[in-house]
Image (cartoon, rainbow, N blue to C red):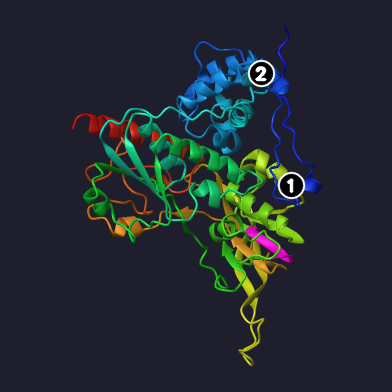
């Protein structure tokens, strides 16, 4: 039988429709399409796709089950190594990981591994009502700081081995960046809630509104009887450019903007936490978070949304799919431009003027690409005399985040690097005995799947450590 050279396309909402709602953009494969896509897999003996997956999902095996129409069996294979399959199938950059290693991709389009994973997870969530079997307790207790992808993965892997696990989350909803950082149209909250409920059914306790470093310290967790602690607190401290005007009203970090929209429901018609409705918006940055912020602003009623990025499209770090979706929805990409000042309304003669301190525009300078920098990308260089002003009334800074220093500042002997990331060894162990860390708290902002891989490594190390006690 001839090989089908291209992936089965993913059905999506039409751009002119989805740009005005928060419903999921991608609609998912049907059973027939999933089987058809699975039939493209060559079932390679050396399984290169597995090596490209940070949590080593048994990819050929689960795809073989999809091909046979045995979708629940496929889910059980995925769940052997992944605690968040419905999440990974939606937000993982498969194109640079498992699919980039696909043998079929050498000549044709690789197998749609991520799309199949999403299909399998959604099928399971829709058709399976059985609760997972709770393993026999092994008598050990472990505390997890943060309920993001690294924390949930570590918790799930340990719970499956019989550990009594408690997860402490600072916000009022479990899920970390999965719920406050990724918009509904890309990852519905009910999907994350379902994954969290599965962990609860395994016996994992989730305690929200607990800020480790304030409500409790890591030392106090040990005093409560926990024998090991995993820190997966993420990187929630936003970075700014330190240019004039960043203190004006209407300037947000992408972190704040997305949290308000996602958890504080600013998308409602009468929000408790109002953010922009209408107007023109500039999002500074070119990563996935910038795409999320720009597309969220559009759905919140912006009449015009710009992406301002200092390099070209070739260097844009966001996923190709997210960039294409943003372009289809009408986001205006202003590439090779860099902000130098945020302009605002000031009337020093009347400090009571309610317009005082509001954004009126963003001054940018045009860039051109010079010699490669340390990262291998060509360094952007300013073009003298090329300044211009974009007329906007909201600016969203999406240039990265760093780990919050709270845990470091309240935990003696916990070493961090110059960027605030917790230093760990090859087993995920920090400079403190029995304290492990992983995900963005160690690396700074990275991908969901890399954080999951760190959580899985830490769980393995904690198990080896406590098994000797």
* Image quadrant in which the C terminus is located: top left
Mark 1 lies on residue:
327
Q: Callout 2 environment at 10 Å: few (<14), some (14 to 19), or many (20+)? A: few
Q: Earlier in the sequence, mark 1 or mark 2?
A: 2
Q: Is residue 409 magenta?
A: no
| Residue at position x 71%, y 13% in the image | 3
Give the image location of residue 267, x and y in percent: 67, 58
Q: Secondary structure at mark 1?
A: helix
Q: Secondary structure at mark 2?
A: loop
- As drawn, the label of residue 4 is none
Mark 2 lies on residue:
107
Give the image location of residue 139, x and y in percent: 25, 34
Label 1 to label 2, Cα distance in Å?
A: 28 Å
Determine if residue 435 is in view: no
Looking at the rendering, the stretch of residues picked out in magenta corresponds to 277-283
Determine if residue 364 is in view: yes
């Amino acid at each position: 039988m001839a090989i089908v050279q291209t992936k089965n396309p993913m059905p999506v909402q039409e751009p002119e429709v989805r740009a005005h709602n928060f419903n999921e953009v991608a609609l998912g494969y049907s059973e027939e399409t999933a089987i058809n896509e699975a039939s493209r897999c060559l079932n390679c003996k050396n399984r290169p796709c597995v090596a490209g997956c940070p949590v080593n999902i048994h990819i050929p095996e689960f795809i073989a089950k999809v091909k046979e129409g045995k979708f629940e069996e496929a889910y059980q294979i995925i769940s052997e190594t992944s605690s968040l399959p419905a999440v990974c199938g939606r937000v993982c950059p498969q194109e640079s990981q498992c699919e980039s290693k696909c043998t079929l991709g050498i000549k044709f389009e690789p197998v749609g591994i991520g799309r199949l994973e999403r299909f399998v997870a959604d099928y399971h969530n829709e058709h399976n009502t059985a609760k997972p079997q709770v393993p026999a307790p092994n008598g050990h207790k472990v505390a997890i700081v943060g309920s993001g992808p690294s924390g949930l993965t570590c918790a799930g892997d340990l719970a499956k081995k019989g550990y009594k696990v408690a997860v402490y989350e600072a916000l009022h909803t479990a899920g970390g960046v999965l719920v406050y950082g990724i918009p509904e149209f890309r990852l519905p909250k009910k999907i994350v809630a379902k994954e969290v409920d599965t962990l609860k059914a395994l016996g994992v306790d989730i305690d929200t509104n607990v800020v480790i470093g304030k409500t409790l310290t890591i030392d106090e967790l040990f005093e409560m009887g926990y024998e090991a602690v995993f820190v997966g607190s993420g990187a929630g401290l936003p970075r700014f450019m330190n240019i004039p005007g960043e203190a004006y009203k209407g300037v947000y970090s992408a972190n704040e903007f997305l949290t308000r929209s996602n958890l504080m429901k600013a998308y409602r018609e009468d929000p408790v936490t109002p953010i922009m409705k209408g107007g023109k918006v500039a999002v500074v940055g070119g990563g996935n978070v910038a795409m999320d912020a720009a597309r969220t602003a559009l759905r919140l009623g912006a009449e015009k949304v710009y992406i301002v990025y200092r390099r070209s499209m070739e260097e844009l770090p966001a996923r190709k799919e997210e960039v294409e979706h943003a372009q289809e929805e009408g986001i205006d990409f202003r590439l090779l431009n860099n902000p130098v000042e945020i302009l605002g309304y000031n009337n020093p003669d009347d400090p009571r003027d309610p317009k005082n301190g509001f954004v009126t525009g963003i001054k940018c300078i045009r860039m051109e690409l010079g010699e490669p920098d340390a990262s291998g990308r060509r360094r952007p260089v300013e073009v003298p005399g090329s300044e211009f002003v974009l007329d906007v009334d909201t600016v969203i800074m999406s240039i990265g985040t760093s780990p919050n220093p709270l845990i470091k500042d309240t935990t003696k002997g916990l070493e961090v690097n110059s960027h605030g990331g917790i230093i760990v060894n090859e087993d995920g162990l920090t400079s403190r005995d029995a304290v492990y860390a992983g995900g963005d708290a160690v690396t700074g902002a990275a991908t969901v799947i890399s954080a999951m891989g760190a959580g899985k490594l830490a769980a393995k190390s904690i198990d080896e450590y406590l098994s000797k006690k």
